Image (spheres, helix red, strand yellow):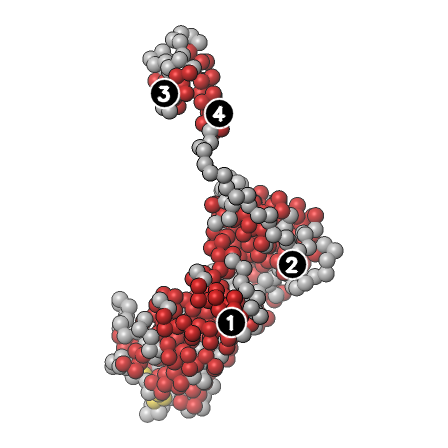
């Protein structure tokens, strides 16, 4: 067997196994009936040798102990639940029909949010599984790394599979100097890596916007274009009128992307000089035509993109398939303060302006630009006007041109108003167009919205439709319905009598879907109680 210790011993064994010992025996194995057994013995020995073999290397410095985590540890029941959630893996159910079992992986994000809101730390033995889950799902990373705490970064430095945690952490996991350490702050800003400097700027901006802007100004001229763009983007936090002079200077930057970002930030300040310039340009393009019996809006789009427009962030080249004039018009209207339009258009309210007809097929372009302006300027009044009443005959509303835009407009409204609007929309138009709108509603859903969703699902069930046509909404309901609704849903868990025109077997599928929904709601209620433990509730979680 000594010959099997050669460097190519494994390849010899594999070749003999593929060809058969009658045709080829490996070195050191005698031909005959015992050759197959000898081959397996040799393979077992070689396997152990390969696994146990270590290449010599220099002795490394022993790692420092993991940092302390001073947060309270999860209650025992919640820790056991976390272990169960992390042990669940997508696809372990075998696919096909889901049955009545809750999807634990879909509950993990909400569980993490609630645990973090209460300031808990996980048991140390669960950190590897928590990091593995975050590695496989990028949507989990922020919440998972927050729960994992400082020890996750310590582990990430020891295991290359978890290096993503260092990239996701501010400054690559580097500790930032305290606010009072001005010398350390200055040194890190001037000598640190880009990720460290970006994290430092963000941290200072969060507590003192003016100090962050002044720090950025000290090195602005010497920064690379791509770095200037990222640093400038950090000014979105705490954006205010005091930032205008710096942003106005950035409008002359040699980088087109930096200029565009500066213009976007300035247009979000309705009182800025750029916003005033855009108001003049946009106002010259839109007017009320009073020559007709009924007033209407007339649009005269720009005929050129002059240097002043380009300096203020208007992109001169239109995307493929888009007309240049409509492209320039949309950018001007989007950047103009919405407050100028009532005075420009006869003192009308936003609702009255949106209701006016628009000549020459400019309505879609004009309203789409107003939608973007309402979202950028967080103007709830204009958002309401563009959304229109939820029970309007046309599901598209008076101004929005897509479900995505309606969802963005809803984001400017308060949580309660948003839920009421979507509930009214569902009651009128059903669930077929509501999925994207439901995604912007707060969790747990307010009672009117929850009732509207359940009622719409019940209508689809009674109509004999297949439940997988509503699987997306049902999945949202499992995560977003208030668990207190579980009792009201018990009557829907039975298999309904099938109508003659119903899809075959639909009743059984609906019964399973509602059983899974009720089971999931009860599980969420149990999870919330486990997380509450004996500690005082620190904030509103994802259930009441």
Asked if the residue at tag 4 contacts the one at tag 3, i.e. Cβ–Cβ closer than 8 Å, the answer is no
Dot 4 corresponds to which residue? 48
Dot 1 corresponds to which residue? 205
Q: Sequence-wise, which precedes: disc 2 or disc 1?
A: 2
150 displayed left or right of 372: right
Query: Which corner quadrant holds the N terminus?
Result: top left
Residue found at x 62% / y 58% = 116
- Badge 2 marks a residue whose secondary structure is loop
- Residue 373 in the image: state x and y as whole percent: 42, 77
Dot 3 corresponds to which residue? 12
Residue found at x 43% / y 81% = 244
Q: Sequence-wise, which precedes: disc 4 or disc 2?
A: 4
Which of the 4 image quadrants contains residue 109? bottom right
Q: Nearer the viewer, residue 98 or 253?
A: 253
The residues tagged by marks 4 and 2 sit, at their Cα atoms, a distance apart of 46 Å
Residue 205, visible in the rendered structure = yes
Asked if the residue at tag 3 contacts the one at tag 1, i.e. Cβ–Cβ closer than 8 Å, the answer is no
7 displayed left or right of 419: left
């Amino acid at each position: 067997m000594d010959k099997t210790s050669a460097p190519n011993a494994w390849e010899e064994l594999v070749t003999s196994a593929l060809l058969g010992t009658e045709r080829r025996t490996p070195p050191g194995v005698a031909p005959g009936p015992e050759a197959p057994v000898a081959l397996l013995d040799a393979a077992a020995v070689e396997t152990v040798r390969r696994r146990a073999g270590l290449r010599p290397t220099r002795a490394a410095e022993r790692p420092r102990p993991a940092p302390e985590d001073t947060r309270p540890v999860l209650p025992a029941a919640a820790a056991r639940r976390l272990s169960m959630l992390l042990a669940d893996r997508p696809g372990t159910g075998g696919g096909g029909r889901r049955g009545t079992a809750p999807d634990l992986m879909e509950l993990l994000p909400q569980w993490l949010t609630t645990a973090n809101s209460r300031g808990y730390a996980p048991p140390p033995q669960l950190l590897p599984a928590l990091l593995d889950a975050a590695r496989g799902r990028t949507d989990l990373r922020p919440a998972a790394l927050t729960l994992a705490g400082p020890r996750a970064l310590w582990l990430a430095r020891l295991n290359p599979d978890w290096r993503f945690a260092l990239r996701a952490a501010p400054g690559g996991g580097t500790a930032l100097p305290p606010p009072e350490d001005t010398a350390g702050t200055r040194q890190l800003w001037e000598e640190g890596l880009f990720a460290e400097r970006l994290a430092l700027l963000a941290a200072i901006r969060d507590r003192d916007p003016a100090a962050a802007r002044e720090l950025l100004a000290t090195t602005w001229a010497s920064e690379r274009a791509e770095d200037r763009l990222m640093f400038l983007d950090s000014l979105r936090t705490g954006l205010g009128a005091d930032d205008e002079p710096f942003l106005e200077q950035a409008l002359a930057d040699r980088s087109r992307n930096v200029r565009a970002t500066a213009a976007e930030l300035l247009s979000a300040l309705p009182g800025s000089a750029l916003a005033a310039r855009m108001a003049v340009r946009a106002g010259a393009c839109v007017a009320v035509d009073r020559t007709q019996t009924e007033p209407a809006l007339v649009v005269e789009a720009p005929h050129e993109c002059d240097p002043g427009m380009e300096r203020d962030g208007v992109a001169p080249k239109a995307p493929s398939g888009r007309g240049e004039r409509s492209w320039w018009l949309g950018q001007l209207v989007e950047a103009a303060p919405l407050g100028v339009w009532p005075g420009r258009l006869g003192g009308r309210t936003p609702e009255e302006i949106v209701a006016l007809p628009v000549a020459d097929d400019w309505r879609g372009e004009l309203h789409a630009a107003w939608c973007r302006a309402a979202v950028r300027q967080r103007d709830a009044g204009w958002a309401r006007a563009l959304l229109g009443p939820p029970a309007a005959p046309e599901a598209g509303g008076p101004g929005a041109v897509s479900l995505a835009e309606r969802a963005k407009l809803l984001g400017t409204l308060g949580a309660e108003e948003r839920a009421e609007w979507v509930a009214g929309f569902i009651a009128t138009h059903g669930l077929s167009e509501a999925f994207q709108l439901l995604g912007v509603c707060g969790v747990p859903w307010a009672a009117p919205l929850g009732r509207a969703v359940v009622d719409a699902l019940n209508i689809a069930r009674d109509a004999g439709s297949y439940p997988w046509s509503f699987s997306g909404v049902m999945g949202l309901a499992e995560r977003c319905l208030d668990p207190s609704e579980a009792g009201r849903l018990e009557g829907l868990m039975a298999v309904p009598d099938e109508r003659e025109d119903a899809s075959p077997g639909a009743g059984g599928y609906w019964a399973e879907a509602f059983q899974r929904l009720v089971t999931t709601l009860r599980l969420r209620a149990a999870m919330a109680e486990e997380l509450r433990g004996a500690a005082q509730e620190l904030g509103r979680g994802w259930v009441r």
